[in-house]
Image (spheres, coloured by chain):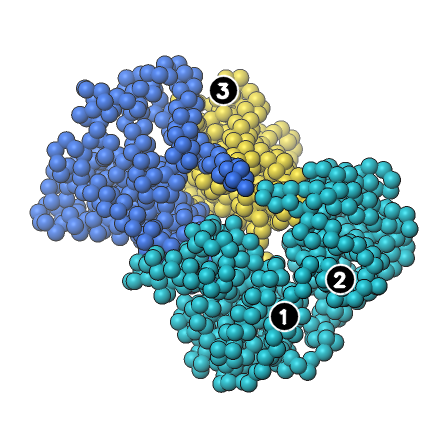
Chain colours: A yellow, B cyan, C blue
Amino acid sequence: MTDFPILALLAGMIVAATPILLAGIGELVVEKAGVLNLGVEGMMIVGAICGFAVAYETQSVTLGYLGAAMGGAALALVFGVLTQFLMTNQVATGLALTLTGLGVAALIGQPYIGIRGTTVGAVPLGPMREIPVLGPVLFRHDAMVYISILIVACVWYVLRFTRAGLVLRAIGENHHAAHALGCKVIVTRLAAIVFGGVCAGLGGAYLSLVRVPQWAEGMTAGAGWIALALVVFAGWRAWGVLVGACLFGGLTALQLFLQAAGVAVLGEYLSMIPYVMTIVALVIISSGRVRAAPCAPASLGLPFTAAT
Amino acid sequence: MAALLVLDSLTKTYPGVVANSAVSLEVGQGEIHALLGENGAGKSTLVRMIYGLVRPDSGTMTLDGAPFMPLGPQAARTAGIGMVFQHFSLFDALNVAENVALGMDATPPNLAGSIRKISTDYGLALEPDRLAGDLSAGERQRVEIVRCLLQKPRLMVMDEPTSVLAPQEADRLFQTLRRLRAEGMSILYISHRLREIRHLCDRATILRRGKVAGICIPAEESVQSIAGMVVGTQMTSPAGRVYTPGKVLLSVTQLSLGSDDPFGPSLKDVRFDLHAGEVLGIAGVAGNGQNELLAALSGEARTQPGAILMKGEPVGDRGPDHRRLRGLLAAPEERLGHAAVQDMSLTENALLTGWQGLHNRGFINWGAATSFARAVIERFDVRPPNPANAAKVMSGGNLQKFLIGREILQHPEVFVVNQPTWGVDAAAAAAIRTALLELADNGAGVVVISHDLDELMQISDNFAVLAGGQLSPVQRTSGVTAEDIGVLMGGTHATA
Amino acid sequence: MTVLAQLIAVTATMVAGGILFWFLGKNPFEVIRIIFWDPLFDENLSSYARPQLLVKAAPLILIALGLSLGFRAGIWNIGAEGQFIIGAIFGAGAGLAFYPAESAIIFPLMVFAGALGGFLWAMIPAILKTRFNTNEILVSLLLVYVAELILASMSLGLMRNPEGSGFPGSRNFRSYPSAHNAELIANTGIHWGVITTVFALAVACVLLQRHMLGYQIRLAGQAARAARFSGVNPAGLVIICLGISGSAAGLAGMFEVSGPSGQISIDFNAGYGFTAIIVAFLGRLNPIGIMFAGLLLALTYIGGELASLRLGLPSAAIQVFQGMFLFFMLATDVLVTFCLRWRSRMAI
């Protein structure tokens, strides 16, 4: 690819960061609305297989992503209906979503095991590809990389500058007060949950369509959980998710690079790095020793019933 | 005076309760109309119907001659009704401008500018960029009022606006309200503070048990006569008592403590002595460190060991269980979720603080726990008298009697109680006050933290004010005037 | 009322599962019969399947009992799978260290080591939670992946059978009597893990109903502030709940690896730690409920295997089926609340 492994590493970082960036930004919106959806892993893996299957059957990557988004959204909708209308416990329902999602994905995925997927080309960015250093790192990726960054920018803008974003944050901070002011708590939360499902689905599809690109059972391997950790790490800020995803992507790329280079440590221990580093990052953030301590939305995970 | 809002026989029933029964009321143009009544008299339900949060079962409303039945707050606002909430209405993590924008149906351009203009026009000083969580109670209320005024309402509804204000802040509020009235706005003013209603309001409608109990012109009535209409019967207040200080039981020195609540005040160098037989009243506006002080004394929050001496023993770093064994007991303000668990039975709730005498090597003696709960129920006339009832089905007054009784029957030597009669009916409140005085007569020391000044004047021997996390020096209650207290209560907020 | 709701949940799952099986081109009635009836009552199968029921249910129930304590207190240990694995590695390690010596002390030592392994692994999220306020859900879950990687490295490296001609996996405990968790009564499936589970059931019942710890756990789960006011030390409770659930999962892992599974191998862990979460909720965090839920899910495992052998039903279908159970159970919970509220309204 390039002469410098460092450039390959950085490019690899971006590819490794994209799935968790997508899932993370989706979950950020969900949590900003005051809902904790622990089903990210399940929605991601369903997105992964839906994306792969649709793309394989239709030979269209775009339709694949669309299928993945719908798969993730469908699962999210189940979570939304259960937690918002039937008032089930969010932690339990989210876990159920993950466990069921893994099963559903395995079920759908059976005929696709071992099949090589369609290749996804890079966006033709013309002369920008040839910029030294920046070109190979930033401008030779597929469209979803740029779309995901666009999504982060949109989420940041909407949350910060629009009325819809303000209402969403208000609901996450204090749903009773928001309700008293006439905000539609349940509808807003449902929309946020579905958005989270769409993003997680896309993130999963990026794994099975670009990063691997193949279908394997359990291929998300905890990416959904890392995305959840990412939201905490980011202190519930959109750009924080981007930074965290890059850090994490960098670690993953480094780990793969070291394994490929045959560093004399057992591969299993290198593979642990992303998980262990995520825990370390969580500890550093939660201990409040860093400046700008994170502030979780005050109504996060609490059930809401409109008082009559 | 032409009528702006007319309510005609509004009725609203909830399972088991008739919240409003055929309530009729008339608010004139440019009138400040008071809505009076005890807790549970049906004031909130009535207001929620006007603001579209609740639909009445029957009855009609007319606004400016046209039928009016808002489907939601938004419809009410469009029709020209503004609401100033007291609770649950500001978002601590959002700034003033965002909070104001949320209460409006469309965000106007240059909102910050409009906020500055309104606040200078009406003397409601506010900074649009500050976080709501960092504001004082008075400033928080100004946010509500500014939010309401920006929509140019014809009728502004205010729910208990002065309950969290220091007297000086309340005076400033009254000036603003009078000015709005002069400009032709109508105000529906809900309160149970009779004095301020006499000064401020043109007419008053009194609710009792969901029904209109009377309409009057407050300026022509005495506080006593209005109180008679509100309560229905004359309440007996506890007889005056003679206080002779005994030995020091509890000694608090240099007590400083950060708050659990990111927007709550920290306690700063609190110090006082509590003697045997003494009732020490601690006054102050809500949110000035009352919960923090209770947590520090109960043992829920830990401090330097020597900051709290119980009969000479340092207990500042010990938990509630240790302190209870030393005779230091506490009763927090919030009943459900703090003093009691709503889904647990009274017996299980009796165990909550009484467990140390009700288990054997960790194994619970349920028989003894039930007997203990029964004893509390009997002694304090808790109804319905069934220890198997869940806490959440009890009325506020009966649950509070149970919770105060639970501590008193454990024979505390020092008893710290926060808001003992908040949201409690008058009969239960009187019973609780009598029980606290009895406890002191029997040689215990009692600390009563309350924002009800009348209550403290009535039962306390000594008196101090908590403001901004700092406690004023303790003084004899008998020599204190309402003005003194007002100045103290202003505390650090007086300049805000 | 709750029993009725549970019956509704089970029936709804059967119907939804039937539709799922029908979509997969199977006869729904046949599949459901094979899963729920044949393992228990078919003459040819039940002699094999009935003992298997206890073998599969015991670890599920043991883990779920531990988890339910924490779940009641709002302490979410969802990394039981990791504690299960580490418990198994500790237990197996303790046994293999003595190979080929025979002694009556070896097995008790392995039991202790297994519990210790699970305990220590659970202490990581517990201590991070109490010291740094780190979210225990994420930490305990992420540690599952770490534990799985440790397991892989163990079965490929340190614990690999030196006489196994290079295949991954440890020595088999079946050929090491002192360390083997054998069937105690022939053809019943009862091994030491089953006995431990029955004992744990009794302890859990007493703990929750009669002991202060159970009371404090309930208190902390229903109202954290009230618990603190009562004198419960929240940090202590986190350590206790995670410690108990970790030890239980570790024990289950140790009994599994030294008995039914027989050896440390890359994938000896059959997802018991995750399924136990379903069991805990399905049993409504109540010991007796958990017992029934554990037996029910064990039945779906055995019946699922059978259906996959006989009809070629994909094993993932059973996983979906188990997930549906949980969804329907959560949904019918609401039904109970609504009915109670409705009834109390009628009473007034």
Q: Amino acid at mark 2?
A: Ile
Q: Is residue B103 left or right of residue A253?
A: right
Residue at x 47%, y 68% (from the top left corner): B408
The answer to which image quadrant residue C212 occupies is bottom left
Residue at x 33%, y 47% (from the top left corner): C66
Q: Amino acid at mark 1?
A: Ser
- Residue that mark 1 sits on: B237
Residue at x 87%, y 42% (from the top left corner): B64
Q: Is residue A212 left or right of residue B80?
A: left
- Residue that mark 2 sits on: B226
Give x and y (percent) for residue B292. Answer: 56, 67
- Residue that mark 3 sits on: A56
Label 2 resides on the chain identified as: B
Q: Disc 3 on helix, strand or loop?
A: helix
Q: CA gap, disc 2 to disc 1?
A: 17 Å
The answer to whether dots 2 and 1 both sit on one chain is yes
Residue at x 52%, y 43% (from the top left corner): A36
Q: Which of the two residues, B319 or C139, is positioned nearer the viewer here?
A: B319
Q: CA gap, disc 1 to disc 3?
A: 83 Å
Q: Are marks 2 and 3 in contact (CB under 8 Å)?
A: no
